Amino acid sequence: MKDGKRAVDLIVISDVHLGTRGSHAKELLAYLKTVQPKILILNGDIIDVWQFSKRYWPQSHMKVIKYILGLTDKKTKVYYITGNHDEIFRKFANTRLGHLRIVNQLILKLEGEKTWFFHGDVFDVIMQHSKWLAKAGAIGYDSLIILNNTVNWVSRMLGRGKVSLSKRIKENVKTAIKYIHNFEDTAATLSVKKGYSTIVCGHIHHPDKREIIINKKSVLYLNSGDWIENLSALEYHEGDWKVVYYRDLFTERGNDAIASEEEQTLGDMKNKQLFNLMLKEFQS
């Protein structure tokens, strides 16, 4: 332990959705300050460009960006893997800025075995064929998170436990459509074909660690979850993976929306060909 921080070989976080009211940026920053990773992998949807508005960019969100950039100065390798909500960065794939690298996917050799990291939206048929519907759903999801914060505030005043409206609705929807032929099994099947023993995704906001058997071959499937509801990350150290939760490391701080403190602007340009180009990269 150095400076009170835990030494960790590798950390994966995803689906932070900075720029939205549901993002727990303060909690993420608190977590990051407890660890000293050799490698930090940002597995997509870190900044929510889809819903980004100059009317909402709190100082707490900017602090997360500044802290991560500061890690690169301390020689931590940082990989920014593009997701669907931050797809604008796909045009900068393979760009290197010191110890920061932007990629669409990443393959690392850990303990002699290949591990495949990518966000996961390439398996989401909704993203491929009905992008407008996915964006509408994202806006509705963020609004539901705000409503959920109010419901939980009332629930706490009444001495009752928390509820997750968005999680219940998402689980019902995913069950009904089977989440496009099962996201996890599709990812594991492709991983076996490519000869990877471990696959690490984000995207579906469901932290997980489990073995999946495909054609009698075992694949370790990992998902880093999110910093909207689960407040979770993946840690890899000395050959072992584990899912960690903010609630297990800190006293729970509640889910009240963070007040807007500071404004920031980003470009609004888009490129419809970026997703198709990334698909070709995955198929090669």
Image (cartoon, grey):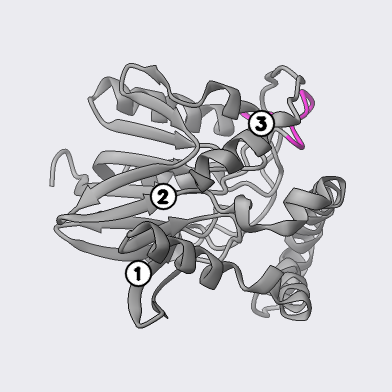
- Is the Cβ of the residue at disc 2 closer than 8 Å to that at disc 3? no
Q: Is 58 within the magenta? A: yes
Q: Which residue is mark 2?
A: 117
Q: Which residue is mark 3?
A: 274
Mark 1 to mark 2 CA distance (whole Å): 12 Å
Up-down relation of residue 220 to residue 86 (above or below): below
Element on which disc 3 rests: helix
Amino acid type of disc 2?
A: Phe
Going 78% across and 60% down the picture, which residue do you hit? 150
Instruction: Tell which of 229 and 131 is nearer to you.
Output: 131
In the displayed structure image, the side of residue 86 where residue 197 appears, left or right: left
Element on which disc 2 rests: strand
Going 13% across and 47% down the picture, which residue do you hit? 1
Instruction: Tell which of 237 and 55 is nearer to you.
Output: 237
Mark 1 to mark 3 CA distance (whole Å): 29 Å
Look at the image and give the residue range highlighted in magenta. 50-59
State which mark lies toward you, 1 or 3: 3
Q: Is 156 within the magenta? A: no
- Is the Cβ of the residue at disc 1 closer than 8 Å to that at disc 3? no
Residue 122: tell me if it is visible. Answer: yes
- Could you tell me what secondary structure mostly forms the magenta stretch? loop
Instruction: Tell which of 29 and 69 is nearer to you.
Output: 69
Q: Which residue is mark 1?
A: 220
Task: Point out the residue furthest to the front here.
Answer: 284
Amino acid type of disc 3?
A: Leu
- Residue 64: horizontal and vertical position, in percent? 48, 33
Q: Report which quarter residue 25 is drawn in.
A: top right
- Which of the marked residues, 1 or 2, is nearer the chain's N terminus? 2
- Residue 228: horizontal and vertical position, in percent? 61, 54
Mark 2 packing: few (<14 Cα in 10 Å), some, or many (20+)? Answer: many
Up-down relation of residue 37 to residue 140 (above or below): above
